[in-house]
Amino acid sequence: MQAEERRSSSQGAPIRVAVVGATGYTGAELLRLLLGHREVRVTAVCGHSKAGRPVSEVLPSLSGLLDAEFAAFDADAIAEVAELAFCALPHGASAPTVAALRERGLRVFDLSADFRLRDPAVYAEWYGEHGAPGLFGEAVYGLVELYREALVGASLVAVPGCYPTATLLAAAPLLREGLIETDRILVDAKSGVSGAGRKAGGATHLPEAAEGIRAYKVGGAHRHTAEIEQEMGALAGSAVRICFTPHLVPMTRGILATVYAPLRAGTSVSRCVEAARALYRGSPSVAVLEAGRCPDTLWVRGSNRAHISYVIDERAGMLIAQGAIDNLLKGAAGQAIQCMNVALGLPEAEGIGGAGAWP
Amino acid sequence: MQAEERRSSSQGAPIRVAVVGATGYTGAELLRLLLGHREVRVTAVCGHSKAGRPVSEVLPSLSGLLDAEFAAFDADAIAEVAELAFCALPHGASAPTVAALRERGLRVFDLSADFRLRDPAVYAEWYGEHGAPGLFGEAVYGLVELYREALVGASLVAVPGCYPTATLLAAAPLLREGLIETDRILVDAKSGVSGAGRKAGGATHLPEAAEGIRAYKVGGAHRHTAEIEQEMGALAGSAVRICFTPHLVPMTRGILATVYAPLRAGTSVSRCVEAARALYRGSPSVAVLEAGRCPDTLWVRGSNRAHISYVIDERAGMLIAQGAIDNLLKGAAGQAIQCMNVALGLPEAEGIGGAGAWP
Amino acid sequence: MQAEERRSSSQGAPIRVAVVGATGYTGAELLRLLLGHREVRVTAVCGHSKAGRPVSEVLPSLSGLLDAEFAAFDADAIAEVAELAFCALPHGASAPTVAALRERGLRVFDLSADFRLRDPAVYAEWYGEHGAPGLFGEAVYGLVELYREALVGASLVAVPGCYPTATLLAAAPLLREGLIETDRILVDAKSGVSGAGRKAGGATHLPEAAEGIRAYKVGGAHRHTAEIEQEMGALAGSAVRICFTPHLVPMTRGILATVYAPLRAGTSVSRCVEAARALYRGSPSVAVLEAGRCPDTLWVRGSNRAHISYVIDERAGMLIAQGAIDNLLKGAAGQAIQCMNVALGLPEAEGIGGAGAWP
Amino acid sequence: MQAEERRSSSQGAPIRVAVVGATGYTGAELLRLLLGHREVRVTAVCGHSKAGRPVSEVLPSLSGLLDAEFAAFDADAIAEVAELAFCALPHGASAPTVAALRERGLRVFDLSADFRLRDPAVYAEWYGEHGAPGLFGEAVYGLVELYREALVGASLVAVPGCYPTATLLAAAPLLREGLIETDRILVDAKSGVSGAGRKAGGATHLPEAAEGIRAYKVGGAHRHTAEIEQEMGALAGSAVRICFTPHLVPMTRGILATVYAPLRAGTSVSRCVEAARALYRGSPSVAVLEAGRCPDTLWVRGSNRAHISYVIDERAGMLIAQGAIDNLLKGAAGQAIQCMNVALGLPEAEGIGGAGAWP
């Protein structure tokens, strides 16, 4: 009855892993997941701002589970104890760190935006100057369900953004199969507040964030637009422009991407569901919901899973595709480990295969 | 019945008001607001399911403020003590009740959907058989900002739905001034859970509703679609079809309508803002935000106010208009009282003019 | 300055009021309530950190309702336009500001802790050096229900803290009537996050505050302990020591104080309820719930009301008294205006008499 | 750096497990955890009210992870496919079900209250007639940290209640070491709403539960009182009476028990912390926090962990002990599996050893 047997384990020594930028929410999730992963061993935990402080003081959910201190970043020291690193730093700051680790031979999974784009001009337009131009273009884009083969053996992986992951998983089957028009795609996305990171500010102060919803970076200003357009264009085979509007929702975790696209003739919900099931066959992290059911971010909270759905609005001639993920897991830390599993030839779901703690 | 007589400032006797269907959230808000209104006196409180029970037991926030019991509905009894009634009943059940009160000469403000549509065929398509066909078409649509003149002296008012109010206030200036294309309007709306009413169910049970967001009635299935299309068509001067998708947000109150429409040539944000300010000049319940600012439902929580904004996505050629309201106030009870004020020639903001308790 | 002149019902000119320290949550509530108060006119709005910025930018719920800018504090300028001031500054900073305003003849309602204590040694122990020792002891403690007579005509009022208000309203009838033992009183209090103020920080960052509950300042470390003990002692007629433990609850507003005290022989719930009803007869802000009912902070959210209740645990020989308030209203801004009303001989409930927007 | 090596796995066939009463929140958690447990295989999933429906329809977080349907309860059918069962039924209904499974030789872990008490008179007083008197007294009380030895090989285990778990883990070291007086112990407990179960009702309807806190079953009326007193008495060596007051907190998961007890002479915080560390040495699910730190339920959310702390209020002569758990895990499903692990001689933390997904 239980789908997948989980007893097997490899014979070899554990892979020694460093986590750089581990003081935030993504770092906390990386550490949690790696502690439960059977093939790795965390050997370095770096966090500039908390160097010297016990991990459990900064990340209290790890009290009693990880007896370690944060270290300042030191590429040489890391190279001595680890063969693989996760970088959870802000864009800009990440590129030189990644470069330093790559120079020392480490396999790197970068959770920043620095290596997600393939066109340097697009990077420059949205992010400015790149911090390691020599590495630009070297990374594999880590949306496992679309780039699984390219990821095998990869030594530099750009883990996708949270909004792109939710959006692309829902839209990919449609674009690949030509089920929608591509000139008027609109993405109205909703995110929990943890997507804004751990740094406190007015917009995330509970009294001002807990009982309201609002849009932000309206008008095509959010940087994930470029990443979504790049991958949609690759799937469609021609350039795609979208209208992308993110909203901040009064909850901690979760992204729901509601994707609207004009229908092409002949498209039905069942064709969409079939296309998605075909594309995601063998993908342990994606569930295509039964026709008639739409995802709730709560259903994937705490898991590395994506739930996707398709509905047609016949009156308006629109297809509504939805993708729901946990922004810190399938949208960040979980997906990074999924990339690692694939890159190393481990079972794809190792350490990240379960359901979330619902409700 | 009202424990404490408020200092009345008009010369005349207070208007005697009945609230029918007062046991739910809209009823609670109607009673709260009417108790603070200087020109009225609540003389009857009806609630079928709670007949005989003290109001303060069912609506605990009124403890010590309203010493009354719920009565079963009795049109003759109401007609003896009231000259005006608010009906906060479900559609279908409302029409015959409204008819009974109208027959006895009461002025009626109906918060159900029964009298909002003008085309009986459209009503039949979305709601089925009408409960008082003789009255169909007699009501004034109570979106005060658009129908202020028609409301003066009105004896039957159909108070608009919550989604239509938030959507139309944002879209009306654009449609009136021809600033957008009307063939591809899309409304992605987000509502707090109180919009689902007081009846408990799985979808609103806190553990399953507090930490997730989800769409519902996706694909053009929500009945408010008809009401929005009717009013958009009236504003545009030709039939309008929209794609309307509501979402349930983990918070109690608030609706944010994000309206997307293709730009017409020459449209700028400042023209939109000017058009809105011109339309809403003298409207005490609407604030058009400064360009660059987008509304948060928290800013209008607990008030009868609407905040609206306009942003252009140049890359995508789209205008993004947003309207935020408190669904129980400007989306229901507050707007009903605003309608009453206009109908009776009272100051429009009497009893509903203040800010909400922020944060 | 107030956009719209409210119909004033008194004969005299409106009282000209300044609000000092108006950029935070208490300031927002003071402005909201004063805008709806028929006998006052806000003539000065001071906020050091936001001087020169429009009020509606900093307090967005006032958009379209108050067309004014924050000014830096200037006692002379205030004295020219106002005869009365509310000070919503932190303790320590408040005393010299209050002193400057008193010197210029203004009646002052101070919401800080600076004038609440009557014993300078106790102040020094809990807060350190006082900023205006010459005024120490001059203020009336503004718990209206207990000090109504002393407040009439008062020119300096110390508005009580939020925890003391909730606690004392529940405990006062018991202490006055000798219904409990006073040597083992324990107060377990629960507060919404807005009690921590508007300044963002880790403990109030939504992702770390929205789904957990925790105690803080455990072990008798919270400064409100001194204030509660002072007033309990006055009521009991002898010194009282309490064990006071506050908790932070994942919600914006509300305080629930659960007060435990050993029963005295002969005490029954009905005697407690009667004692409370006798004490609070004529008090428009307090509702003593029916025996068997316990308060929910949601029931008083957005109002200046307190709900109190009494239950006996026969097995344990304990009385459990509970008081629920909105910390920003009856625990701060609302109570300040209640004090002003009494001090000036206005109706006690003017501007603060209604229910909150439930739910 | 990683405390515990997790590669080892047993050679034998997996243990075949049934979950009875699996449609609620505890059932969802049992299934989630068992799917990730390396030594078991779920072979039967029973849920009376949902018999015949796919598990993933009722428990949507399991979509794509468990392809099974709910079955009606049938003891013979279960006995054919399982050797061990978890029962997550309401008290009263549970006892005969447990009896039927025991008669067929299954090892049973019962999550109801039916087998937690040792004195039939106490059971009768709090719960009424027992549904399987022949089994009464046969169960081991499954608070692993206190009954580890008795649990080895146990065939009937009464998994403790959520409030007792949080309370007893905090209080046990104090009672065992005589660090507190036992005649005036008071427990003020705070629970998330999932503790009320999956059945929707007014008190758990999001609009009425999301922004308020309230006590319930005040005055010694909550049934967990009996369980706490039984175990406290066993630890103290003499009968204990407590004053226990639970509160409902606006969040989904988590229990914080704040335990107040009069200090005994000579007790210090460091002695308490030492006593707790000594008692919980080798217990993988308990972390005794550093002196000065108090637990937040968020820190244990989604995990089988308990965080406990000790603070002294010198002024009041009170010790304040706190215990925080996730009510659905260490307070229910997680603890049940912990009991199973110990009973079967498996590693105690297998399947339940990780941190929760914070924040």
Image (spheres, coloured by chain):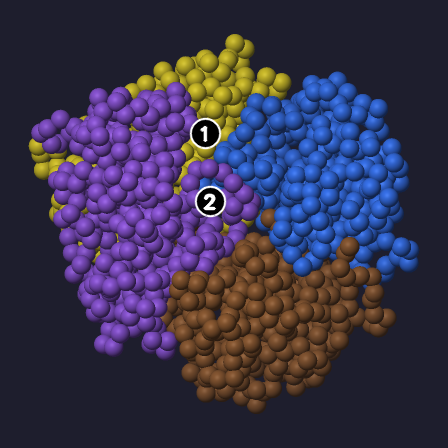
Chain colours: A brown, B purple, C yellow, D blue
Q: Would you say D31 lies left or right of C179 here?
A: right
Q: Is residue C283 above or below residue A201?
A: above
Which residue type does callout 1 highlight?
A: Pro
> Residue B33 appears in which quarter of the rendering?
top left
- Give the residue at x 85% y 50%: D15
Can residue A270 be seen here? The reply is: yes
Which residue is identified by label 2? C251
Of residues B188 and A164, the one drawn nearer to the viewer in this rendering: B188
Name the image quarter holding residue C115: top left
Look at 26% across and 60% down and name the residue there: B233
N-terminal of the two: label 1 or label 2?
2
| Furthest residue in direction top, as rendered | C266
**Is A324 left or right of C8, judged from the image as shown?**
right
Find disc 1 in the rendering and name its residue: C295
- In the rendering, at what x and y percent does residue B21 appear? 35, 32
| Residue at 56% across, 76% down | A177
- Picture layout, residue A168 above or below residue D219: below
Q: CA distance from mark 1 to mark 2?
A: 16 Å
Instruction: Report the chain holding disc 1.
Output: C
Indicate which disc residue D62 carries. none
Q: What secondary structure is found at the residue carrying circle 2?
A: loop
**Quick one: label 2, few (<14), some, or many (20+) residues within 10 Å?**
many
Q: Is residue A102 above or below residue C344?
A: below
Pick the front one: A242 or D228: A242
- Answer above or below: position of A158 versus A22: below
* Quarter the C terminus of chain C occupies: top left
The local secondary structure at tag 1 comes to loop
